């Protein structure tokens, strides 16, 4: 097994963390990898944080639940606090500095802070695209799935709303190219 | 056709649609709400029957009515709702009416919670409703099986004129996986010589479970048992995973079988010969498959998301030849692959 | 000699097992006549209740099924929705329809299912030996109201026809009785119209038949008939309660 990534995407309800997860899973599928996606659901989604777990592997996947996540996207402080304890030494962690005070976490060298919401709002012109900015930023670090297949996945996922394809691809690229 | 990324609950719907579903009757309850929502769109668009019923009781009895006429109907719910459906299930078993009932299990007892669970095993396989009857119970463990087993379950229900239950869980229902929608749309069906379709050109038929005359109900029960024996013989299914040389065999179904598989891989990587027998049918239980591997040197471990239900059937199958241990968590708690691995290590000692 | 009356084709030859003087036999015959006259026997599917009329399938000469107690409206919904070309009716007593099956009754009516409901109201649970029904009259003595139904303790008789008339889904509701010949003739008309409505696709029709139950009422058949006329009908007045099909 060369590839085995367990990624959690967490944020406030409405920040599109479920969709970001399905885009990652769809990208893995486009890349002929095995994948599972598992959401938080029901009452959990109201008020608190929402999250989805994506597992990507080149072999059959057992559990769809991440017991040892290798990646985290945290779009708000609550989510970062909730999932940080589950992350390991080598985990890739992306945090949305537009909504999280980076100073509070500066001792944790694993966390990469990116002003995700700001990029979506100012560069892309739609704050709802923050989730796609985050996906772009993540795959830059994990390399799996690759940008080409994420682009394909966006096209598949938005096939019924073609007007949104370009905007979301632009958002993925903005996250991917953020330095 | 390319695989499509869908939730287990949606794969289930597609399986039913491809099987030629004529009617869906449901009632909202988490974690199966995708099913009535998806069906309300699909069935109405296809010009078929969809009713959001006033209760789980009513939904199950609508299935009873539709299936009594030879049509293909299903209902889905989650644990508390499945308790309400037991009335109709007992009647359907007694009246020998086929039909498909889906339980996307959540935590119990009572209202419990909405997390995935496997605490309804007893209810599904040991009766649930009143009387001496069995449901045929399948336990899909991935979205592909949610599709394929649902597709097949209508044929099996009709073959034996017996209700089929799909015992799923919140995790398999809610998770998305790529699914190969590889089944052909069913359009033609065998003529049913028992159903109610109007008595044109034949004697009227009557489907009932009230059998008051002397000895008739007993004979009916004996006939049912003959049918159950046939189902035991024909339909018990299990997936075997690395059992040939295994010293520790996990028995696990649905979502816990997937978690267990991770642990088995890790155990093997550590030089421990672990394997798994995964019941695909919970009734009939794959007793023979388990019996075959029961040896004094082999240890069995039942892993379930409850505090020990299927383990009783594992013990019966093993019949004292091997030791049988249990690992489980209740009320929405999830056994982790690490928990399973630790238990395997402990058994290895 | 001319034959002036014969058994309807929609009735089997089996002798009825109902108690002497019971109203069910008359109501069965009226349904059978209506089905025959409309020429729908070969496409009729009946849903029998739990209660005295559970044996309806032994008497009706068309397809029949049983339903759990109170669930005939749900079973009928399942049948009709998947077989819109068939004629589907439920035959239910007061316990089945107005107690344990209240939710099914109301929602089936509210959905405006295109079915026919024959509701036999005899103010008690006959099958189980004469207990209080939802329709038992104030003061009426039954197995479980030995001091007479007291509204403070047991509430009031449920007037299902009036209740259902408030629902937009219902199209035709009439209360009839079968204690004497003129009323039987009127009941027949109503029952036939309720089936005719279904044939024409008019929607939900509901016929409440006030029926007599001499054995469980502890009355002779004659006393029972008199009680219907003088007491029962005071609480449950006859007539068309709703008809939007005109």
Image (cartoon, coloured by chain):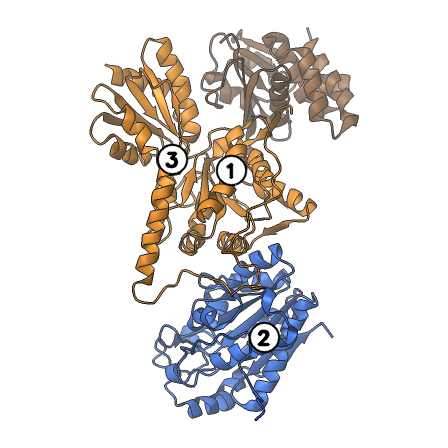
Chain colours: A brown, B orange, C blue
Residues tagged by mark 3 and mark 1 found on one chain of the structure? yes
Disc 2 element = strand
Pick whichever, B93 or B267, lies toward us: B93
Cα–Cα gap, marks 2 and 3: 50 Å
Q: Chain of mark 2?
A: C
Residue B236 is marked as 3
Image position, residue A80 (x, y; %): 54, 19
Residues tagged by mark 2 and mark 1 found on one chain of the structure? no
At x 31% / y 17%, what residue is drawn?
A: B246
Disc 1 element = helix
Q: Is residue B157 above or below residue B142?
A: below
Pointer 1 residue: B152
Q: Is residue C201 above or below residue C15?
A: above
Image position, residue A98 (x, y; %): 66, 18
Residue C207 is marked as 2
Cα–Cα gap, marks 2 and 1: 42 Å
* Dot 2 alpha-carbon crowd within 10 angstroms: few under 14, some 14 to 19, many 20 or more: many
Q: Quadrant of the C terminus of chain C?
A: bottom right
Residues tagged by mark 2 and mark 3 found on one chain of the structure? no
Q: Is residue B91 above or below residue C204?
A: above
């Amino acid at each position: 097994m060369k590839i085995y990534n367990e990624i959690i995407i967490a944020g406030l309800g409405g920040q599109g963390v479920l969709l970001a997860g399905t885009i990652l899973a769809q990208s893995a599928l486009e890349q002929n990898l095995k994948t599972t996606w598992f959401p938080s659901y029901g009452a959990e989604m109201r008020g608190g944080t929402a999250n989805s777990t994506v597992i990507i592997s080149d072999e059959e996947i057992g559990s769809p639940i991440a017991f040892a996540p290798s990646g985290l996207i945290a779009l708000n402080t609550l989510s970062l606090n909730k999932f940080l304890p589950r992350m390991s030494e080598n985990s890739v962690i992306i945090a949305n500095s537009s909504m999280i005070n980076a100073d509070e976490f500066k001792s944790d060298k694993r966390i990469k802070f990116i002003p995700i919401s700001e990029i979506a709002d100012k560069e892309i012109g739609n704050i709802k695209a923050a989730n796609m900015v985050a996906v772009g930023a993540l795959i830059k670090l994990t390399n799996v799935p690759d940008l080409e297949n994420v682009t394909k996945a966006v096209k598949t996922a938005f096939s019924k709303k073609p007007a949104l394809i370009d905007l979301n691809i632009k958002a993925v690229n903005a996250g991917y190219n953020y330095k | 056709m390319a695989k499509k990324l869908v939730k287990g609950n949606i794969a289930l719907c597609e399986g039913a649609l491809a099987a030629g579903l004529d009617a869906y009757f449901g009632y909202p309850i988490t974690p199966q709400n995708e099913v009535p929502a998806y069906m309300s769109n699909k069935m109405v668009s296809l010009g078929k029957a969809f009713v959001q019923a006033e209760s789980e009781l009513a939904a199950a009895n609508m299935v009873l009515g539709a299936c009594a006429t030879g049509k293909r109907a299903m209902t889905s719910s989650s644990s508390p709702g499945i308790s309400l459906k037991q009335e109709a299930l007992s009647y359907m078993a007694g009246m020998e009416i086929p039909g498909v009932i889906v339980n996307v299990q959540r935590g119990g007892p009572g209202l419990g919670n909405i997390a995935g669970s496997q605490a309804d095993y007893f209810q599904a396989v040991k009766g649930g409703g009143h009387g001496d009857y069995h449901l045929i119970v399948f336990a899909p463990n991935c979205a592909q099986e949610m599709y394929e087993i649902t597709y097949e379950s209508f044929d099996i229900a009709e073959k034996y004129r017996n209700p089929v239950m799909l015992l799923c869980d919140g995790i398999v229902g809610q998770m998305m996986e790529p699914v190969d929608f590889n089944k052909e749309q069913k359009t033609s069906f065998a003529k049913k010589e028992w159903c109610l379709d109007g008595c044109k050109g034949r004697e009227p038929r009557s489907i009932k479970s009230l059998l008051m005359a002397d000895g008739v109900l007993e004979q009916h029960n004996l006939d049912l048992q003959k049918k159950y024996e046939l189902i035991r013989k024909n339909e018990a299914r299990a997936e075997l995973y690395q059992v040939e040389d295994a010293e520790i065999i996990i028995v696990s179904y649905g979502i816990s079988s997937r978690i267990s598989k991770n642990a088995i891989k890790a155990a093997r990587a550590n030089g421990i010969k672990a394997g798994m027998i995964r019941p695909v049918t919970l009734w009939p239980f794959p007793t023979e498959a388990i019996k075959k591997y029961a040896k004094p040197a082999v240890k069995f471990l039942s892993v379930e998301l409850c505090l020990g239900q299927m383990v009783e059937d594992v013990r019966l199958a093993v019949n004292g030849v091997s030791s049988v241990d249990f690992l489980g968590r209740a009320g929405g708690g999830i056994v982790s692959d690490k928990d399973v691995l630790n238990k395997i290590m402990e058994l290895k000692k | 000699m001319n034959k002036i009356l014969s058994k309807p084709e929609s009735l089997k030859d089996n002798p009825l097992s109902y108690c002497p003087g019971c109203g069910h036999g008359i109501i069965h015959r009226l349904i059978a006549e209506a089905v025959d006259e409309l020429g729908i026997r070969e496409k009729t599917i009946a849903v029998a209740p739990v209660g005295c009329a559970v044996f309806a399938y032994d008497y009706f000469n068309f397809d029949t099924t049983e339903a759990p107690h109170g669930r005939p409206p749900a079973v009928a919904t399942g049948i009709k929705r998947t077989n819109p070309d068939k004629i589907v009716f439920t035959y239910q007593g007061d316990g089945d329809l107005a107690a344990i099956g209240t939710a099914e009754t109301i929602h089936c009516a509210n959905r405006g299912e295109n079915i026919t409901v024959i509701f036999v109201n005899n103010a008690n649970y006959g099958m189980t030996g004469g207990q209080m029904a939802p329709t038992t009259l104030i003061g009426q003595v039954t197995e479980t109201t030995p001091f007479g139904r007291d509204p403070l303790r047991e509430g009031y008789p449920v007037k299902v026809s009036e209740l259902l008339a408030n629902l937009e889904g219902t199209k035709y509701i009439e209360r009839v009785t079968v204690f004497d010949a003129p009323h039987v003739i009127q009941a027949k008309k109503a029952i036939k119209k309720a089936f005719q409505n279904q044939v024409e696709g008019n929607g939900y029709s509901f016929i409440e038949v006030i029926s007599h139950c001499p054995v469980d009422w502890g009355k002779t058949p004659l006393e029972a008939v008199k009680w219907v006329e003088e007491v029962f009908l005071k609480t449950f007045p006859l007539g068309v309660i709703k008809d939007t099909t005109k």
